Structures are given as C-alpha cells and as structure tokens.
Amino acid sequence: MKFSLATWNINSVRMRLDHIKRLVEAHNPDILCLQEIKCANGSFPIEHFQKLGYNHIELNGQKAYHGVATLSRLPIERVETRDFNGTGEARHLAVRLSAPEANGTVVHNFYVPAGGDVPDEKVNPKFGQKLKFLSAMKQWCSDQDNKSANRAILVGDLNVAPLESDVWSHKQLLKVVSHTPVEVEHLEALRNAHDWTDVMREHIPPEEKLFTWWSYRARNWRDSNRGRRLDHIWVTPALKSSSVSLRVIDEARDWEKPSDHAPVLAGFDLNGR
DNA sequence: ATGGCTTACAAAGTAAGA
C-alpha cells in the first residue's frame, strides 16, 4: 500500500484555501495534516476540501487559536484527541487508516505549543507549558504496549528544531525558544520513548541544513534563509523502512500571503513492512 | 534587526506566533 502525506502549519486554513488547492494540484497528497487551522470545527471549510477529493475529514478545531485537521482521500477512522497539557487547547488528533493493508497504521497530527518568548518557565509560563506538553507526550509513548509492533506515523509542528543543522545559526539560537538545550532534551527524550525515527533526516543527512519555517519579518526569506526545522515526520520502528520519499515544498513559502511554514511531503510504502 | 510581519476578533488595539 502506497500513499503520500503532507504536513503543513497553515496559519489559518480559511486564509489559505488557494494555497491548499495549489499544493494539491502540484503534489496531490493522499493525506493532509494541517496545524493552526485557527477556527472552530463549525467554521472549517469542509466543502473546499471535498471538492479537492478529500472526502474523509477529521477535525480538532477551536476558535481563533491552534487547531488541527486531518484530511484524506483514503478511508480513515477517528481514534482520539488528547489534551496533553490539560489546557483544553486543540493540539492533537489521531486517525487510523481503514484499509486492511494498512494493518492499523495510525496517523498522529500534533501542534506542540510555541512556548512564548523567554526560555525560562519561572518568568514565562508558556515555556513551562511547552516542556510539560513534551513530557506528557513522552509519558504517553512510554506507556504504550507492544512498542515493536505499533504502526504509527507522527507528524506536525513540534516547534523544536533539534539539530544544529535544523537552524540557521546554532550558536545564535541557543537561547532562542525552539532551539534551547532543554527543549531539545525534551524532544529527544520523547523520540527515544518510542524509538521514533526522524524520517526527514533519514532522507536528508544531518550535516545538511534543513528548514520548514522562515519568519515573516525577513525582507527576503530565501536570501536571508534564517530558517528553522520545526515541522517533523516520525515513524515507529515497525514502519522504519516505509518512508520512500521526502521533500520540503519550500516554493509554497513564496506564494502570495503565505503561511510562515512550508509543507513537508512524504511518500510511504507499507507493502510487506 | 530574530523581529522588521501576520493572523483572529463582539473590531481597535490586543494577543499570539517563533
């Protein structure tokens, strides 16, 4: 069973309908995982996605902030949404691929809290909440049974750039939220808690700079290239060899009134895996 | 100069993103 999946922090789904159409026309992902849809479920533009052929739609939205959506051409079943911080914010959605050949593969769509400006939980509660969210995710992974048999894909805006090559300047970002050592430690502990594979870095060597986000404030995002890799695609050990292609669709960052994140597109082949 | 911009919203200025 082959399929493609795109993950994209869309920064308001209603502002970006043309961009979604453009991504679909150019790359036609079978599954689309969106973050920061910034609308309640009732305001989600379902018809727009149905017209594009996404007839299987699961939402975890909230008004104005955050919110995730998973849209699929392949049949999916909603599994759950989890509130890792107990804040009531919409930051997770899990669905299962219904096809028997998928052997129960689950797709987790995440939007980890950004964490505010100051990387000190004593003066910035949002930073503490981000670390708490990552710790709760880690605990959830540790608690899973049958870790070697679990078939799961975890994608989304994890809001941490773990490697030196995941930011434009490791040295200059050590005290900037998203690349501080304590955040990287939390992300790595989470990854190790289920032995997740960082699919992007399976395809693109860790020596090579790789970004998925560029600030709106740069005069020319491509020339200054002060990016970070905040968006991720991970798989469980059972799916380690299932990822057959990967690309950051950075041209989307050049479209008119873009999201500050670019989509990440991955191809999977579950056959015999 | 990694904040210079962008978004949502009982709507003008806040809050939030990262």
Image (cartoon, coloured by chain):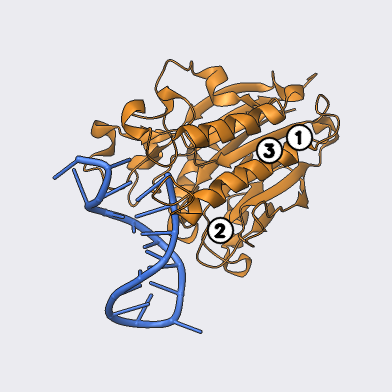
Chain colours: A orange, B blue
Front residue (pair A60, A76): A60
Front residue (pair A176, A72): A176
Point out residue A202 in the picture as x, y percentages from the top left corner.
57, 18
Q: Which mark is residue A138?
A: 3
CA gap, disc 3 and disc 2: 36 Å
The three-letter amino acid code for the residue at tag 3 is Lys
Specify whether A221 is left or right of A162: left
Counting other residues with Cα less than 10 Å from the Cα at mark 2, is it few (<14), some (14-19), or many (20 or more)?
Answer: some
Chain of the residue on which disc 2 is drawn: A
CA gap, disc 2 and disc 1: 39 Å
Point out residue A259 in the picture as x, y percentages from the top left corner.
40, 48
Point out residue A243 in the picture as x, y percentages from the top left corner.
64, 23
Residue behind mark 2: A48
Which of the two marks, 3 or 2, is nearer to us in this view? 3
Secondary-structure class at tag 1: helix
The quadrant of the picture occupied by the N terminus of chain A is top right
The three-letter amino acid code for the residue at tag 2 is His
Residue behind mark 1: A142
Chain of the residue on which disc 1 is drawn: A
Counting other residues with Cα less than 10 Å from the Cα at mark 3, is it few (<14), some (14-19), or many (20 or more)?
Answer: many
